[in-house]
């Protein structure tokens, strides 16, 4: 009898303590906003300012509150999603594949640029460098963007390998610029001899460097790459996922909304997407025997 009494008392205590625990506010509320993040493909402060109207329009259309941030790198974005510190991420293609493989991230939208859902990587050099082909890059200083960037790392390495050059030994020195803007600037200033960036990356710095189109040229383009995308973490409630997806599609279909998106992330529109759209990225990684797990690290 005494044992039964003790067990009942313990059960009542557990229930009492559980009832005393503060309940977490609903996701999307002011107390528990949806966490959205992007990598600094351009200067972070400017990106935050440009994305503010996007977030405000999302809040109006979905009724949710958002906490937007610019993370330091693709790896930080991926790990943030894995730790449930990022609910919605704006991903590059390789970073998305890594996030999907490791943490089950799911793509919901792909960006449209110049009427296409694909783009290319390009290798750039100074116009006065005397470098005119991939062969001319042997023994040079080369800047990648980020080890989890498709256009700034994966595809240029695949280009070199396809041409018969070992990307690990071909250059005298390689560095990571951290962003596409920084890679263009590094080539422009002569800090490196060449760099790999997304197609038309020079346009993004033309305001700061008016003569960049004259001083920096393209010597090679990659095969088509699926465009950047919007992805959600594994386990994000379907209702929230669908509201965000529909709100962004509606924004892209509205002239004023599209103007806001274009200024923030440089897109012509957004379209529904599925995971298999990024199989070309996986095939490129397999061709290079790339360990996806190590890329996250």
Image: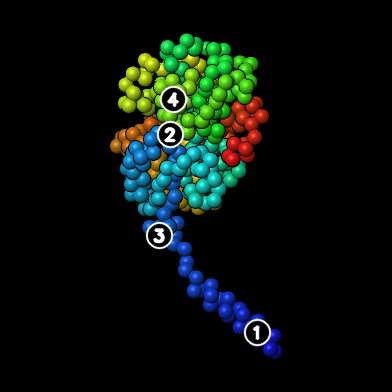
Residue 90 seen in the figure? no
Q: Secondary structure at mark 1?
A: helix
Residue 196: x and y, percent?
50, 24
Q: Earlier along the polypeptide chain: callout 1 or callout 4?
A: 1
Mark whose residue sits in front, 1 or 4: 4
**Numbered disc in front, either 2 or 1:** 2
Is 285 rendered above or below residue 52?
above
Note whether residue 25 is visible: yes
SS type, badge 4: helix
The reply to whether dot 4 and dot 2 touch (C-beta < 8 Å) is no
The image shows residue 246 at horizontal and vertical percentages of 42, 43
Mark 2 sits on what residue? Answer: 41
| Mark 1, residue position | 6
N-term-proximal mark, 4 vs 3? 3
Give me the disc on residue 279.
Answer: none
Please determine whether, in this image, residue 184 is positioned above or below residue 147: above
Q: CA distance from mark 4 to mark 3?
A: 42 Å
Look at mark 4 in the image and give the residue it sits on.
186
Q: Which dot, 4 or 2, sits closer to the camera?
A: 4
Helix, strand or loop under label 3: loop
Judge the density around disc 4: few (<14), some (14-19), many (≥20) Cα neighbours within 10 Å: some
Name the colouring of the figure: rainbow
User: Does residue 75 sit above or below 154 in this rendering?
Assistant: below
Task: For mark 2, give the secondary structure.
Answer: loop
Q: Crowding at label 2, few (<14), some or many (≥20) Cα neighbours within 10 Å?
A: many
What residue sits 33% from the left and 18% below the top?
211
Mark with earlier residue (2, 1): 1
Give the position of the N terminus as an image quadrant. bottom right
């Amino acid at each position: 009898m005494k044992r039964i009494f003790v067990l009942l008392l313990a059960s009542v205590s557990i229930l009492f303590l559980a009832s005393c625990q503060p309940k977490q506010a609903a996701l999307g509320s002011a107390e528990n906003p949806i966490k959205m993040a992007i990598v600094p493909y351009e200067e972070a402060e400017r990106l935050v300012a440009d994305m503010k109207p996007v977030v405000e329009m999302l809040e109006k259309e979905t009724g949710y509150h958002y906490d937007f941030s610019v993370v330091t790198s693709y790896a930080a974005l991926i790990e943030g999603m894995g730790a449930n510190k990022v609910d919605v991420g704006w991903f590059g293609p390789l970073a998305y594949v890594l996030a999907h493989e490791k943490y089950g991230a799911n793509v919901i939208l792909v960006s449209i640029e110049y009427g296409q859902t694909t783009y290319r990587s390009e290798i750039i050099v100074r116009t006065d460098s005397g470098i005119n082909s991939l062969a001319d890059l042997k023994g040079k200083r080369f800047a990648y963007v980020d080890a989890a960037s498709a256009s700034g790392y994966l595809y240029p390495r695949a280009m070199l390998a396809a041409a018969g050059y070992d990307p690990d030994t071909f250059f005298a020195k390689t560095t990571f610029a951290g962003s596409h803007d920084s890679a263009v600037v590094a080539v422009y200033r002569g800090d490196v001899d060449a760099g790999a960036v997304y197609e038309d990356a020079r346009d993004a710095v033309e305001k700061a460097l008016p003569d960049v189109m004259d001083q920096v040229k393209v010597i090679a383009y990659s095969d088509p790459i699926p465009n950047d995308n919007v992805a959600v973490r594994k386990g994000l409630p379907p209702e929230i996922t669908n509201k965000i997806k529909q709100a962004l599609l509606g924004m892209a279909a509205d002239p004023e909304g599209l103007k806001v998106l274009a200024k923030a992330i440089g897109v012509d529109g957004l379209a529904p997407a599925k995971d298999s759209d990024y199989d070309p990225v996986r095939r490129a990684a397999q061709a290079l025997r790339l360990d996806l797990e190590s890329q996250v690290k």
